[in-house]
């Protein structure tokens, strides 16, 4: 055991500070969400204002109102804020040159992540909800994005056409419908207006089973806008038994490193009471456990 | 101008915490040792001056208590600066110019282990515009380091190389706090404290104390064979507001070095008080210290950083090398304030 006694100890001073005509005016203006700089004798603008410039010259009594925005001159990202810091979440310290000022102000930038910080970035001032006439009436600065939201919204009625309608109606009943070229005998799932090989109309509808061969596949590992599933996931081309064109769907129920070309797969359907006119009635295709199809059996469908 | 020399130097090894001592207990061993080395007692000292800050122990007027570590009866001529002990040395040098006394004792003590130094140093900041935000000293230095990177003057790898060299040099220094062979690549894997500063780019926080004895002219020659003559000494200060300075340069250290006479001859070595790695790069560039100058053979403040003492130790390390004959002409530097605001430079020389 240590011989030396030790105890916690807090040092506090309840000092007040007089502010004077320059600093005082600046801090008072912050209460009203007004950001001001002071002019120096040689015509520069200091924000925050000082009584004297760096050459020791008294500044003037001329104040100018400034836009509450500026440019980051240097910065430091703080991943773990200290107790006395203005945020308890990661943030940046920065020297910020307010637009129209010739010096820079120390303050915090609430940027969310370090990646958004760079010297030269544009920031806007965020006012504190409650003002007390101190520098903390400026809550912080935040990044100004150099782009603006520009969404497009248009409304249409979609008409899938005769053949696709037949396909979708089939799906509503749990059936997979294809269109057959009556001459060449090829079956296209989903059905299309004509056999692209012969040009013949494919007006004969035939039902094919929900079982087939996985002819090729990819594993998606990168995120993208509008993605519905969390990567990684597998997407594959499936030639259903009796069909001559593939449909595309998720492959699941099997570890990714066991997925292979030629694997026999079967549709996993949603509960029947949720069926709609949509391929989403099938959740995904999963292995049947049957032996793989030989490459020659599907090579013409690749 | 009278010729003033450092004739002795004593320091406590810098360590994480010297638990067993209050201020007089810290001071007494180094002041008595510095005087004993040259056969003096407090009665022989014309002027005593110390440097420290009360915010380190959190005890107002702790520097007054430190006088208890001296013999102050009959009453002594004594002064104190709320700065590093090197600035007390400067005051003592000025005092010796008066011509009525021939010796001075300078000491400083830094018990940094009691509080949170980065937070205490926020009290150096502007009380209206910066202090209320809580800008700790590491974050302030980080703003300067990032400005260095943005200006293309240094990279993080350059910072790490300064640290690696410093802590390697410190291996031979029994008084250094952090020492050893460090891998630059490993340092660059450390997480940021305040980007771009990682733990190794920052100084340790150490406890220590140091003292030197100054003597004038013939008195110095009586006391030691080879006095470390202060050929020139100069202190320059820059504006307080960080937003009104180019943080990537140090015009104050450039000017102080010029006024101290750096240009009048070559120097063998320089002890630079650069607590943060990037600050050494700024100081070297400002003072024009090239690759021929041995920088911080002691390991510098990156290896031992007791506040208010690390600067005086730079002077002591330089003086020791001159007193022992290991150096001919050398530069000692001390900084105080935020981001190298104050800079004190001296040129010391043997006979």
Image: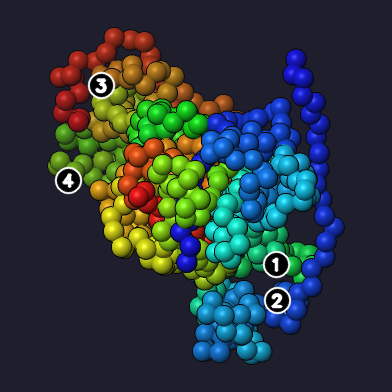
Left or right for A130, reference A47: right
| Percent x, y of residue B207 | 61, 36
Q: CA distance from mark 2 to mark 3?
A: 75 Å
> Which mark identifies residue B327?
none
| Percent x, y of residue A48 | 62, 74
> Which mark identifies residue A261?
3
How is the model colour-coded? rainbow
Q: Is residue B101 visible?
A: yes
Q: In this rendering, which labeled residue sits more in front, label 4 or label 3?
A: 3
Residue at disc 4, secondary structure: loop
| Residue under pointer 2 | A23
**Circles 1 and 2: CB atoms closer than 8 Å:** yes
Q: CA distance from mark 4 to mark 1?
A: 83 Å
Please state the chain letter of the residue tagged with numbered disc 1 in the rendered image. Answer: B
Q: Are marks 4 and 3 on the same chain?
A: yes
Please state the chain letter of the residue tagged with numbered disc 2 in the rendered image. Answer: A
Q: Earlier in the sequence, mark 2 or mark 3?
A: 2
Q: CA distance from mark 4 to mark 3?
A: 30 Å
> Which mark identifies residue A199?
4
Q: In this rendering, which labeled residue sits more in front, label 2 or label 4?
A: 2
Left or right for A174, reference A48: left
Please state the chain letter of the residue tagged with numbered disc 4 in the rendered image. Answer: A
| Residue under pointer 1 | B128
Left or right for B287, reference B208: left
Judge by depth and name the residue closer to the eye, B243 or B177: B177
Q: Quadrant of the N terminus of chain A?
A: top right
Q: Is residue A149 visible?
A: no
Classify 10 Å Cα crowding around label 4: few (below 14), some (14-19), many (20 and above). few
Query: Which quadrant would residue B152 be assigned to in this image?
Result: bottom left
């Amino acid at each position: 055991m240590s011989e030396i006694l030790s105890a916690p100890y807090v040092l506090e001073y309840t000092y007040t500070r007089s502010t004077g005509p320059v600093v005082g005016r600046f801090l008072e203006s912050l209460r009203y969400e007004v950001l001001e700089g002071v002019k120096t004798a040689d015509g520069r603008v200091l924000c925050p204002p000082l009584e004297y410039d760096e050459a020791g010259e008294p500044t003037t009594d001329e104040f100018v109102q400034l836009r509450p925005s500026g440019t980051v001159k240097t910065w430091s990202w703080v991943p773990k804020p200290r107790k006395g810091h203005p945020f308890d979440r990661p943030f940046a310290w920065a020297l910020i040159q307010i637009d129209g000022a010739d010096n820079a102000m120390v303050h915090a930038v609430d940027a969310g992540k370090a990646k958004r910080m760079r010297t030269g970035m544009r920031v806007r001032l965020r006012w504190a909800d409650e003002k007390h006439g101190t520098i903390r009436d400026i809550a912080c600065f935040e990044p100004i994005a150099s782009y603006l939201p520009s969404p497009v919204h248009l409304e249409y009625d979609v008409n899938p056409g005769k053949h696709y309608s037949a396909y979708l109606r089939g799906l509503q009943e749990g059936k997979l419908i294809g269109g057959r070229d009556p001459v060449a005998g090829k079956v296209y799932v989903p059905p299309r207006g004509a056999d692209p090989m012969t040009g013949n109309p494919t007006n004969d509808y035939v039902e094919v089973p929900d079982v087939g061969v996985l002819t090729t596949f990819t594993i998606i590992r990168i995120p993208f806008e509008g993605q519905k599933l969390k990567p990684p996931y597998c997407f594959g081309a499936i030639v259903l038994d009796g069909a001559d064109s593939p449909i595309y769907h998720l492959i699941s129920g099997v570890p990714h490193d066991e997925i292979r070309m030629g694997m026999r797969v079967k549709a996993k359907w949603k509960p029947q009471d949720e069926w709609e006119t949509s391929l989403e009635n099938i959740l995904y295709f999963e292995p049947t456990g049957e032996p793989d199809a030989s490459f020659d059996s599907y090579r013409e469908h690749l | 101008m009278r010729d003033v020399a450092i004739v002795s130097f004593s320091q406590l090894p810098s360590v994480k915490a010297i638990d067993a001592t209050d201020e007089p207990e810290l001071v007494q061993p180094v002041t008595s040792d510095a005087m004993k080395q040259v056969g003096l007692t407090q009665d022989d000292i014309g002027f005593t001056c110390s440097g420290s800050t009360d915010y380190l122990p959190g005890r107002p007027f702790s520097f007054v208590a430190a006088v208890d570590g001296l013999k102050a009866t009959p009453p002594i001529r004594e002064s104190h600066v709320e700065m590093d002990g090197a600035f007390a040395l400067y005051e003592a040098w000025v005092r010796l110019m008066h011509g009525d006394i021939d010796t001075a004792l300078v000491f400083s003590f830094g018990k940094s282990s009691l509080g949170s130094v980065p937070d205490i140093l926020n009290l150096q900041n502007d009380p209206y515009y910066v202090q209320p935000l809580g800008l700790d000293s590491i974050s302030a230095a980080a703003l300067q380091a990032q400005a260095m990177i943005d200006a293309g003057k240094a990279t993080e790898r350059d910072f790490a190389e300064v640290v690696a060299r410093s802590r390697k040099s410190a291996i031979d220094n029994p008084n250094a706090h952090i020492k050893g062979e460090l891998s630059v690549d490993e340092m660059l894997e450390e997480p940021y404290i305040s980007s771009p500063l990682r733990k190794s780019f920052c100084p340790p926080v150490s406890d220590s104390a140091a003292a030197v004895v100054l003597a004038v002219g013939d008195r110095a020659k009586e006391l030691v064979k080879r006095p470390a003559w202060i050929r020139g000494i100069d202190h320059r200060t820059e504006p307080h507001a960080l937003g009104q300075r180019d943080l990537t340069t140090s015009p104050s250290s450039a000017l102080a070095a010029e006024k101290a006479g750096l240009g009048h001859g070559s120097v063998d070595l320089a002890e630079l008080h650069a607590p943060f790695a990037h600050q050494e790069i700024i100081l070297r560039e400002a003072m024009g210290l090239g690759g021929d100058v041995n920088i911080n053979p002691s390991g510098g403040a990156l290896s031992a950083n007791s506040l208010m003492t690390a600067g005086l130790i730079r002077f002591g390390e330089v003086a020791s090398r001159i007193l022992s004959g290991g150096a001919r002409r050398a530069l000692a530097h001390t900084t105080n304030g935020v981001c190298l605001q104050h800079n004190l430079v001296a040129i010391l020389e043997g006979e």
